[in-house]
């Protein structure tokens, strides 16, 4: 039976976590409530609650571009995750298992870290000219490419960490049995690093889903842009449609929240893998 001191320690650890959870949940709850409130309840003083789906009907009406923008964001996320997982897994496996020198590995890791530290705004003019020269300006393929460039270094480093945790004997056994390096990677090593790949996919999906700068500067807006640009367009010089913004924000936030909940066991497994030996 736990003692009083252990109960106090546990309570002291759980209270800050509960408070942090509450602080994170409150903005989400506010958006959910506002999304189903009539406009008059939002703009008038005092507390008045109602229920309507008019805000959702308005933002997803056929004349509005937001449903198309949601599709654009989905395509961008799917393409970025696929490219980052494919190239990041190969790069991480190469750094972890193919005998690169310590100097080369350190240089690659430092370069990967520096890429994430560069403010994207500083690179916008050069990236704009590059996409224009490649004929990808204003296209979803161009946005997928840009998101991949900025997320791939982190994905590669993270995959290297997970491949490092797989025992060397497993790879050596597969090679001794006659498997090629590629077959060993695809059939043996990659499945063992699946929790890490899931964690990388969730991180890349969240980052590319929330990306705003490239969508704003590399597209012409409207139906060519991602949903983050569409949300910003609801802030007008003389009007802010809070109900519609909350409805659209709910539609944007819920898929990522559900994805994180569904993939939670994979993320936990990725974090704790190797902490306990079997």
Image: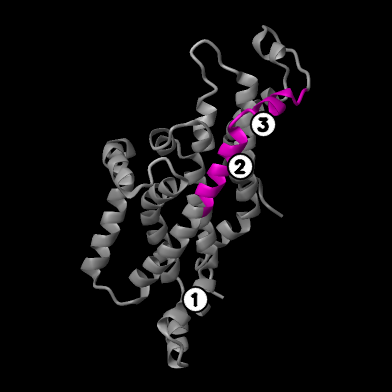
| Image quadrant in which the N terminus is located | bottom right
Indicate which label's residue lies in the foreground, 1 or 3. 3
The answer to whether one can see residue 22 in this image is no
Can residue 129 be seen? yes
Number of dots carrying numbers: 3
Above or below — where is 105 with respect to 151?
below
- Furthest-left residue in view? 103
Q: Residue 104's spot in the image, x, y percent?
A: 23, 67
Residue at the disc numbered 3: 62
Q: Kindly identify the residue that appears in the image at 37 percent across and 60 percent down.
A: 157
Residue 50 position (above or below residue 7): above
Image spot of residue 255 (x, y percent): 63, 44
Residue 272 in the figure: left or right of residue 155 = right
Q: Please check the rendered image and state whether residue 68 is part of the magenta-colored stretch, yes or no.
A: yes
User: Circle 1 — which element?
Assistant: helix
Span highlighted in magenta in the image? 52-78
Residue at 33% in and 45% down: 131
* Element type where label 3 sits in the image: loop
Residue name at image x 36 percent, y 55 percent: 153
**Foreground residue, 186 or 143?**
143
Q: What is the secondary structure assignment of the residue under circle 2? A: helix
Task: Say which of 24 and 215 sits in front.
Answer: 215
How many residues crowd around disc 3 within 10 Å: few (fewer than 14), some, or many (20 or more)? few
Q: Position of residue 138 (x, y in %)?
A: 42, 40
Q: Which residue is mark 1?
A: 186
- Relative side of 248 to 111, left or right: right
The mark that comes first in sequence, 3 or 2, is 2
- Give the residue pinned by disc 2: 14
Q: CA separation, marks 3 and 2?
A: 47 Å
Mark 1 → mark 3, Cα distance in angstroms: 44 Å
Q: How is the image coloured?
A: one colour
């Amino acid at each position: 039976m736990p003692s009083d001191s252990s109960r106090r320690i546990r309570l002291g650890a759980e209270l800050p976590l509960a408070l942090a959870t509450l602080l994170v949940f409150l903005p989400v709850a506010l958006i959910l409530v506002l999304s189903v409130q009539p406009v008059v309840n939002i703009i008038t003083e005092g507390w008045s609650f109602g229920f309507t789906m008019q805000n959702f009907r308005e933002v997803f009406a056929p004349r509005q571009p937001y449903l198309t923008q949601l599709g654009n964001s989905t395509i961008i996320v799917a393409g970025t995750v696929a490219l980052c997982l494919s190239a990041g897994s190969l790069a991480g496996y190469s750094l972890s298992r193919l005998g690169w020198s310590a100097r080369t590995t350190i240089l690659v890791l430092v370069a990967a870290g520096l890429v994430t530290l560069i403010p994207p705004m500083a690179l916008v003019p050069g990236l704009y000219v590059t996409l224009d020269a490649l004929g990808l300006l204003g296209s979803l393929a161009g946005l997928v490419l840009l998101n991949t460039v900025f997320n791939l270094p982190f994905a590669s480093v993270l995959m290297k960490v997970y491949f490092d945790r797989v025992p060397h004997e497993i790879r050596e056994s597969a090679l001794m049995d006659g498997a090629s390096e590629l077959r060993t990677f695809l059939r043996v090593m990659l499945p063992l690093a699946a929790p890490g790949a899931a964690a990388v996919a969730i991180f890349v999906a969240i980052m590319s889903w929330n990306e705003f700068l490239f969508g704003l500067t590399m597209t012409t807006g409207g139906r060519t842009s991602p949903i983050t640009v569409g949300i910003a367009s609801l802030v007008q010089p003389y009007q802010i449609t809070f109900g519609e913004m909350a409805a659209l924000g709910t539609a944007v936030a819920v898929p990522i929240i559900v994805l994180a909940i569904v993939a939670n066991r994979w993320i936990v497994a990725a974090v704790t893998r190797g902490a306990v030996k079997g």
